[in-house]
Amino acid sequence: MSDTWSIGGRVFKSRLLVGTGKYASFEQTRQALELSGAEMVTVAVRRVNLDDKTQDSLLNYIDRKKYVLLPNTAGCYTADDAIRYARLGREVGLGDFIKLEVIGDQKTLFPDNEATLEAAKVLVKEGFIVLPYTSDDPIMAKKLQDAGCAAVMPLGAPIGSGLGLRNPYNVRIILETAKVPVIVDAGVGTASDAALAMEIGCTAVLINTGIAGAKNPLLMAEAMRDAVSAGRKAFLAGRISKKLYAQASSPIEGMIE
């Protein structure tokens, strides 16, 4: 059965998006991407060497024929900064996709929702395919969708926390009204977290620290790949309803006395 999803005119089979920060080396990054099966990878515009072409760069380890780049505005604390870095990324050839991040608090790294919405409106008008990192607020998710964003990316938990999907009920409300892909972003710590996000119906999951920060990042990349696939299949299969009391697996009817 073909089970694909699309965004920005591109069709994807993998529902795991992978970040490229925090790995021990560029080579380890390359190997993790390969094992994850991801087709879209994030790259922080502020962390890419855009000036000195003689220096080794992360981009040298990402096959542009194999992966769609999703530049992000990580480290931006104002709408103006995020807009500037999005434009810079496009100018140097990173493409029209942009993962929009406007951070509102340095300790929690929670998004500044109002600034994110402000930046999103500008970038959408300029032709960017905007995927905004936002809180798990259904109202803000709808506003971002109405502003023309190509997806919404509610956090599962604070960035890098590994706490998993702390409020699946809010995410489910977002899913009820979403007309664009819903991608859980941030907080996924292990395979079961990724599977849960997919089981409730999310389109995809974006993971960076959960893979790069593992004791064995390459093995975790495989685990996350398998978890996203299993969670998606479980969602499509339709789980049994939860019941307070037991229900026999073997029906009593037809049993020989």
Image (cartoon, rainbow, N blue to C red):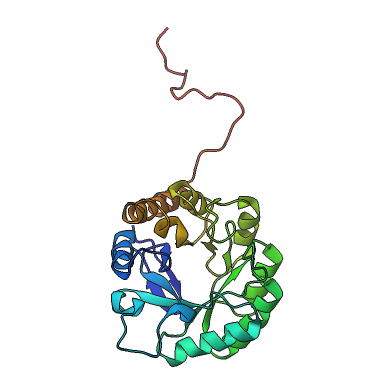
Q: Residue 252 in the image: x percent, y percent?
A: 47, 18
Give the answer, above or below, for where 42 lies relative to 165: below
Is 207 placed left or right of 28 in the picture? right
Looking at the picture, tell me which residue is in the foreground, 69 or 104. Answer: 104
Q: Residue 105 in the image: x percent, y percent?
A: 67, 68
Quadrant placement of the C terminus: top left
Q: Is residue 237 visible?
A: no
Give the answer, above or below, for where 98 lies relative to 183: below
Label count reads 0
At 31% from the left and 64% from the top, the residue drawn is 28
Is 174 placed left or right of 224 in the picture? right
Q: Residue 104 in the image: x percent, y percent?
A: 67, 71
Looking at the picture, tell me which residue is in the foreground, 160 or 5. Answer: 160
At 32% from the left and 52% from the top, the residue drawn is 219
Quadrant placement of the N terminus: bottom left
Q: Is residue 84 visible?
A: yes
Give the answer, above or below, for where 146 lies relative to 245: below
Q: Quadrant of residue 180?
A: bottom right
Is 163 placed left or right of 250 in the picture? right
Q: Quadrant of residue 176?
A: bottom right
Q: Residue 171 in the image: x percent, y percent?
A: 61, 57
